[in-house]
Amino acid sequence: MERLQKAIAEAGVTSRRKAEQFILAGKVKVNGKVIQELGYKVDEKDRIEVEGVPITKEKKVYFLLNKPREMISSVSDEKHRKTVVDLIPCKERIYPVGRLDYDTTGVLLLTNDGEFANILMHPSKEVEKVYIAKIKGILKGEAIKELKQGVLVDGQKVKAERVKVRKIDPKKNTSMVEISIHEGKNHQVKKMFESVGYEVLKLKRERISFFDLTGLKSGEYRPLTPKEIAKVFALKKKEKKHEK
Ligand code: URA
């Protein structure tokens, strides 16, 4: 059973907020009866109509994209610039699972399955996100320690699970650093480095959990395999067992 507005949004008809407006305006029928209650529960057997048009459930789709630089990771842009969604031609209303900055490259998952997105994004699931940051300066041991112990980002303490210097270039005065985090706050990696006194010059997400960029050039994408999708849902089951 799910809420009526969620069922409408998941069918790809409109956003959840607009679905709520349709319901309140008396434009939604369930099994032939007008329903104006927002929390009304429906299941697959219920026949839902929006402005007289029956809705059919949208097929769930899942993609892995190697996001190029200079591209927005949202569904639409007010300045009508290209977004990551434009790179994947499909009729379903997909959206990115979390965001990468305009100038950040690498692993980006896209789907129309809210539950799948939530498993990967929710901090309680502790899904690992691995980034490679090119930073200005030679990263000092003290800064690594601070990043691992936790630093303040937008008033909240966040920490790196792992920090490893992969390469340093003393001539150019830069370091390539691997950093692994669990949360997905806006500009988190850049802000974490900033808080310990370093500027991020380039950023790439190399991995989310077991999803990496193998076989994908910049701008290329592939559908996820049924096995990969099942593995993500298995992360949720593990969590439930912990709760018992
Ligand atoms: N952290 C950032 O600072 N930027 C991103 O795009 C992703 C994580």
Image: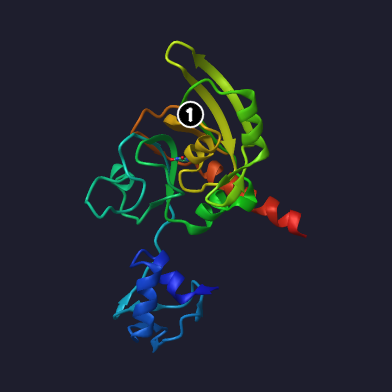
> Residue lying furthest right in this view?
244
Q: Is residue 176 above or below residue 128?
A: above
Residue pointed to by mark 1: 133
> Residue lying furthest front in this view?
197
> Residue lying furthest left in this view?
80
Q: Tell me if I can see residue 62 in this picture.
A: no
Q: Is residue 83 toward the left or the right of residue 132 in the image? A: left
Image quadrant in which the N terminus is located? bottom right
Q: Residue at x 58, y 47 (%)?
A: 232
Amino acid type for the residue under numbered disc 1: Ala
Instruction: Judge the density around disc 1: few (<14), some (14-19), many (≥20) Cα neighbours within 10 Å.
Output: many
Q: Tell me if I can see residue 25 in this picture.
A: yes
Q: Is residue 232 toward the left or the right of residue 220 in the image? A: right
The secondary element bearing badge 1 is classed as: strand
Q: Residue at x 36, y 36 (%)?
A: 103
Tell which of 110 and 46 is nearer to you. Answer: 110
Q: Residue at x 33, y 85 (%)?
A: 25
Image quadrant in which the C terminus is located? bottom right
Tell which of 128 and 147 is nearer to you. Answer: 147
User: What scheme was used to colour the molecule?
Assistant: rainbow
Ligand 1 contact, mark 1 (Cβ < 8 Å) = no
Residue 160 rendering spot, x and y as whole percentages:
61, 37
Residue 4 rendering spot, x and y as whole percentages:
46, 76
Residue 118 rendering spot, x and y as whole percentages:
54, 55
Residue 129 rendering spot, x and y as whole percentages:
55, 39
Which corner quadrant of the image does residue 20 belong to?
A: bottom left
Q: Is residue 221 above or below residue 45?
A: above
Tell which of 237 and 157 is nearer to you. Answer: 157
Q: Residue at x 42, y 42 (%)?
A: 100
